[in-house]
Image (cartoon, rainbow, N blue to C red):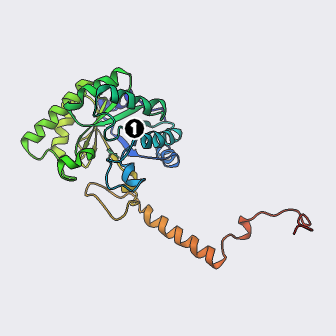
Amino acid sequence: MKKQTVATFRAAKQAGTKLAMLTAYDYSTAKLVDEAGIEGILVGDSLGMTMLGYDDTLPVTMDDMVHHTRAVTRGAEHALVVADMPFMSYHLSPAQAVENAGRLVKEGGAQAVKIEGGAQFASEIQAITRASIPVMGHLGLTPQSINAFGGFKVQGKTTQAAQRLVDDARAIEAAGAFSIVLECIPSELAAIITEAVDVPTIGIGSGAGCDGQILVYQDMLGMYGNMAPKFVRRFAEVGDMMKTAFADYRTAVQDGSFPAPEHTFAAPSGTFDGVN
Ligand code: KIV
C-alpha cells in the first residue's frame, strides 16, 4: 500500500473511493490500524477521555498531543497521520495557531492538523496552510464547544443552523482545509455539504453520504465502558476479551499453572552449585 497524503485524500473523492479513518493514540495501536490498510489515523483530542480519563476534551494540552502524536507516527507507515489541535491552542491568534501546528509536525511528526470550528477560524486555517501544514476542518458537534452547545447534541437541525454549516464548510475550504470532519449532523445535511465542497468530508454520526468515515477505535472495539453512541457499530467485543484474559491470567498465577516450564529459562547443570 502506498503512503497516504493529502493528495491521495483529494484524489479519493474525485475517484469516488471511500476513505476509512480511525483514531489511535499510541505506537502499537497505530501499527495495527496501519497494517489493516486504514487510510488515515487521527490522533484525536478524544485521548483526553479514552487515554487520560477526563470527562471531556477541554483539559488536553499541547504537550499531551505532541507526546501521543510522536508515538503514533512511529507506528504509521502508510496512513496519513492527522493530529488534533487541542482547546485553546489556536483560539488566540493565527500566530499562536501556526506555532502550535508547527509543534505537532516538527516534534510529533504529524502530516496534518485538525481544527474545530467554521468561518470564525478561517484566518487561523489560512495562516497554518500558508506555513505548508495541511489542515483538516471539523464541523457539527465539535466537542471543544460542549459548554457553548450545552452538551453533546446533534447539530444542524434547523434550516438556519444547516445553512450556517454549509457556509462554514465553504469558508474553511476557501481558507485551505484539505478535508472536513462532519460530526453528528443529520445525514441529509452531511450529503448536501459533501456535494457543496470539493474536499473530502469524513463523517462520524453523519450518515453514509460523506466521502469517508471515522470512529474512535475504543468505541468500535467495545473497549470504552458501556457507553455506546447511536452512531457506533461495534466491530468486535475486545473489551470483554481483554477482561476475560486478565482474569484467566490471575487464575493461572494463583493456581500455579503460569508460568509453565516452557515459559522459564534454565542453565547447564551444575551452574548454580555453590551459589547461596
Ligand atoms: O478527537 C477525536 O477523536 C475526534 C473524532 C471523533 C473526529 O475529533
Position of 1 relative to 28 (above/below): above
Disc 1 Cβ-to-ligand 1 distance below 8 Å: no
Q: Where is 189 relative to 240, above or below? A: above
Measured as percent of width and height from the top left, residue 216 is found at 36, 50
Query: Ligand 1: which quarter?
Result: top left
The residue nearer to you, when weighing 63 against 231, is 63
Report the number of discs. 1
Q: Quadrant of residue 179?
A: top left
- Say if 103 sits above or below 233 in the image: above
The x and y percentages for residue 163 are: 11, 36
Type of amino acid at the residue the image marks with label 1: Ala
**Residue at image point 68% right, 69% down:** 259
Q: In the rendered view, would you say 123 is above or below 66? A: above
Q: Residue at x 31, y 29 (%)?
A: 178
Instruction: Please state which of residues 263 and 13 is positioned toward the viewer in this rendering.
Output: 263
- Counting from the top left corner in percent of width and height, residue 108 is at 47, 35
Q: Which residue is mark 1?
A: 83
Please tell me in which quadrant of the rendered image residue 230 appears.
Answer: bottom left
Q: Residue at x 33, y 39 (%)?
A: 18
Q: Residues within 10 Å of mark 1 (few under 14, many from 20)?
A: many
Residue occupying the far top of the picture: 130
Q: Is residue 81 left or right of residue 195?
A: right
Where disc 1 sits, the SS reads strand
Q: Is 76 displayed left or right of 124 in the figure?
A: right
Q: Nearer the viewer, residue 94 or 159?
A: 94
Pinpoint residue 145: horizontal percent, then vertical percent: 23, 45
Residue farthest along the left direction in this orientation:
159
Furthest toward the front, the residue is 92
| Closer to the camera in the image, 77 or 86 | 86
Considering the image in quadrants, where does the C terminus appear?
bottom right
